[in-house]
Structures are given as structure tokens and as C-alpha cells.
Image (tube, rainbow, N blue to C red):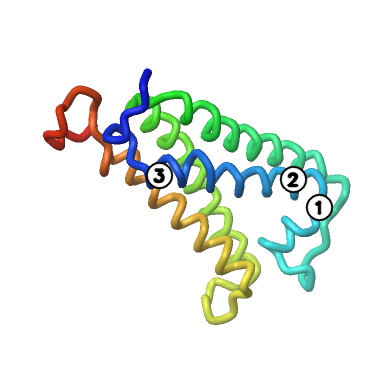
Amino acid sequence: MAHSPRTIPTFYRVFFIYLDPVMSLWAAYACFADPDLLLDSYVPKTISVRNPLHDALFHQLGGAFFYIAMSQAVLLSYTNDVNIWKIVHGGLLGWDLAILYGIWNGLSVQGRLDPGVWRMEDWITVGSTLVIGLARAAVVAGIGLRKIGDNGKGKTG
């Protein structure tokens, strides 16, 4: 299918084919090569230490991040089909919601729900997940997407 800039806006293409996959690949790398760094982004070293017996969970999480990066960078760059974009991001929106719930639950258990006590790592984790989740929700809602063949009349997919 030929590229139709009207179908998938440039913002979505750049954000989901380049930016988000790079972030996901970084997370996958951290899961395999530096799980302490990844764990510290959610749980401060001062209150918990990684148990190497749990590294299998980091490896599985790393595989999930790798899959997310590839599904966006490869599959989404291959298609202009609005329905495929919505399906992929609908599933990944569930992933983002699970991450946000996990962050909330973790902060709650740690007694750190008050944003006034958050570290820079907390702000980055929450902020980036919220931004990505909102962008995914916009794709799922069809905001800015047009069906092929609408002749620019603004019908959203």
C-alpha cells in the first residue's frame, strides 16, 4: 500500500514508529543488561534490593518490551491501515494502563503516593507512560486518522 500522509498523521508515525520503539528497546536492554537500573526507576535502592532469583521476570519483561518495539517499528511502518493501527494501540493501551496501575500500586505500598516526595525517576516514569498512553488513546479514538479514499473530507477512521 502506498504511503498516504493523510491516513496516518506524521506525528503518530514519528512517535510510534521511531520514538516509542527506541524507548521500548532501551527498557528491553535494561531488563537484560542492567535490571538494577530498571528496578531503581520504580523502587528506590534505599528501600529494596533486586533479588537475582527473580531475574527471569526481568527477562520476560525485556522480551515484552522488545516485542512492543518491533511491532511498532516494523508492523506499523509497513501499513497505513487505520484499523491495524487502532488494534495495535488498543492492545498497547492496556499495557500502559497496567504499567500505570503497577506504578500507583508500588508507590502506594512504598508510602510514596504524594507527588511531593517523588524522585526524578518517578516523574519520568509516570510522565512518559501518561504521554504515551494518551497518544495511544488518541489513536484508538481515531483522533486525526482518516480512512483511505475519503478524499480529504475529514471522515475519521
Instruction: Say which label, 2 or 1, has the lower sequence index.
Output: 2
Question: What residue would you read off at disc 1?
Answer: 34
On the picture, is 52 further left or further right than 91?
right
Kindly indicate whether the residue at mark 2 contacts the one at mark 3 (C-beta within 8 angstroms).
no
Instruction: Say which label, 3 or 2, has the lower sequence index.
Output: 2
Which of the 4 image quarters holds residue 144?
Answer: top left
Give me the residue at 79% from left, 52% from top.
35
Up-down relation of residue 150 to residue 8 (above or below):
above
On the picture, is 53 further left or further right than 146?
right
Separation of marks 1 and 3 at Cα, in angstroms: 28 Å
Q: Quadrant of the N terminus?
A: top left
Where residue 36 appears, as percent x and y from the top left, is: 80, 57
Q: Amino acid at mark 1?
A: Asp
Q: Residues within 10 Å of mark 3 (few under 14, many from 20)?
A: many
Residue at the limit of the structure toward the right, as seen here: 52
Image mark count: 3
Q: Amino acid at mark 3?
A: Arg
Instruction: Say which label, 1 or 3, has the lower sequence index.
Output: 1
Q: Quadrant of the C terminus?
A: top left
> At numbered mark 1, what does the secondary structure look like: helix, strand or loop?
loop
On the picture, is 43 further left or further right than 96?
right
Which of the 4 image quarters holds residue 113?
Answer: bottom right
Q: Residues within 10 Å of mark 2 (few under 14, many from 20)?
A: some
Residue at the limit of the structure toward the bottom, as seen here: 116
Kindly indicate whether the residue at mark 3 contacts the one at mark 1 (C-beta within 8 angstroms).
no
Give residue 29's mark. 2
Give me the residue at 33% from left, 35% from top.
8
Kindly indicate whether the residue at mark 1 contacts the one at mark 2 (C-beta within 8 angstroms).
yes
Question: What residue would you read off at disc 3?
Answer: 136
Separation of marks 2 and 1 at Cα, in angstroms: 7 Å
Separation of marks 3 and 2 at Cα, in angstroms: 23 Å
